[in-house]
Amino acid sequence: MAHTLAQKLLQRHTDEAITGPGQIVQCRVDVVLANDITAPLAIDAFKAMGAKRVFDREKIVLVMDHFVPQKDLASANQVLVSRAFAEEQAIPRYYEGGISGVEHALLPEAGLVGPGDLVVGADSHTCTYGGVGAFATGMGSTDIGAAMALGETWLKVPGSIRVQVEGTLPKWLRAKDIMLLLIGRLGVDGARYQALEFAGDAVDRLPVEGRLTIANMAIEAGAKVGLFPVDRLTQEYCASHDRPGVEGLRGDDDAEYVQTVRLDVTDQEPVVACPHIPSNVKPVSEVGTLPVQQVIIGSCTNGRISDMRDAAEILAGRKVDRKVRCIVLPATPAVWKQCLREGLMETFTDAGCIVGPCTCGPCLGGHMGILGDGERAVATTNRNFKGRMGSLASEIYLASPVVAAASAVAGRVAAPADLGL
């Protein structure tokens, strides 16, 4: 029987024969993840079920990343609970402070996830790891507490949507644009509980960091997972992060797909997702002259070194508009240090940016960049819901790092072409 990539990945983790979408299967997990917001709830569930020890301390990952450093008493106490549990359970993969980073950038970089894995996390953007060929999905904290105790969970086999991306990316088009275009096509629920399986010649050439960006936002189309084939680029990326994995994982050509969506990126201009939903996608040239007060470059979607380089290329030799707060948040300490080595930090600060710690921070309206009444932001984050970054009367435009950086310089929603680039 021909199988989709999602079915192949689940089959590796269950003793039951995968027969098709809708089937409920019990699966072994390779990694169980939680963060400073969700870990305390998962720990409560773990203890409520009477569990005494985690199933495998090497397979539990706790990342303190949403409030870095902790912004108030409540966030400080959440970390205390998580740290105490990690010490009690002798969990070695506990990340806090200067060794921590935004979880969905940190785990692939640290080689903690890789091809063929099954990863469950108490965070909706756990689907990021599909960029390296893992079946990775977010769950509620109660389910994560059970997974920490049992090392397994149940999953419904999703149907799969094949996303065929063809053509040559124009100079300033990025992976973020591809995903926003897809969400604009499907809508925020068009892939509900489906697997988005990416293919096509543009995907074959897409660097793994771009694939991680796309997989990260699969949930914004309602998908259970976003999956990329395990190819040469995957293997090279994982090997460079001390994580060799299985080879040649991809869906069968004759597998049954719910539908096929085709995107041709040739001659496509950069886009933004306008308020207040990720599917409200428009080319930058159609947005009009909209002043912005804040720009965010970072997050689990676009805080990797390639994103920092993109932003720096636009900002080099230019100044951020005096009416704009441009906040740059490298996603991990390794990215931060690489920015320093390459001179990107000097580029950012010379341009007038604020460079902050490795935190989710403003993405979820946490801290370090809250929007006031009537303020507008261009952000490389993944959600632009009403009030997501602060005031209910604020607006968020989602964009790639090059569009975000261009907007910071122009003082309005802008593309690199608007700066003559």
Image: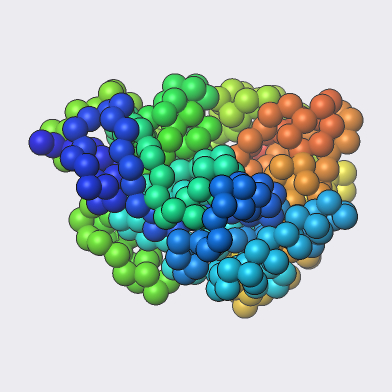
Q: Is residue 161 left or right of residue 403?
A: left
In the image, is residue 222 above or below residue 357?
above
Instruction: Find residue 214 and report its horizontal and vertical position in percent.
Output: 46, 43
Which residue is most to the bottom? Answer: 341
The N terminus - image quarter: top left
Instruction: Find residue 282 and report its horizontal and vertical position in percent.
Output: 57, 25
Residue appearing at x 30%, y 26% in the figure:
22
Instruction: Find residue 339 and report its horizontal and vertical position in percent.
Output: 63, 70
**Occupied quadrant, residue 364:** top right
Nearest the eye: 88 or 418: 88
Which residue is most to the left? Answer: 1
* Residue 367 in view here: yes
Nearest the eye: 228 or 310: 228
In the image, is residue 152 above or below residue 70?
above
Residue appearing at x 52%, y 43% in the figure:
143
Nearest the eye: 226 or 95: 95
**Occupied quadrant, residue 287:** top right
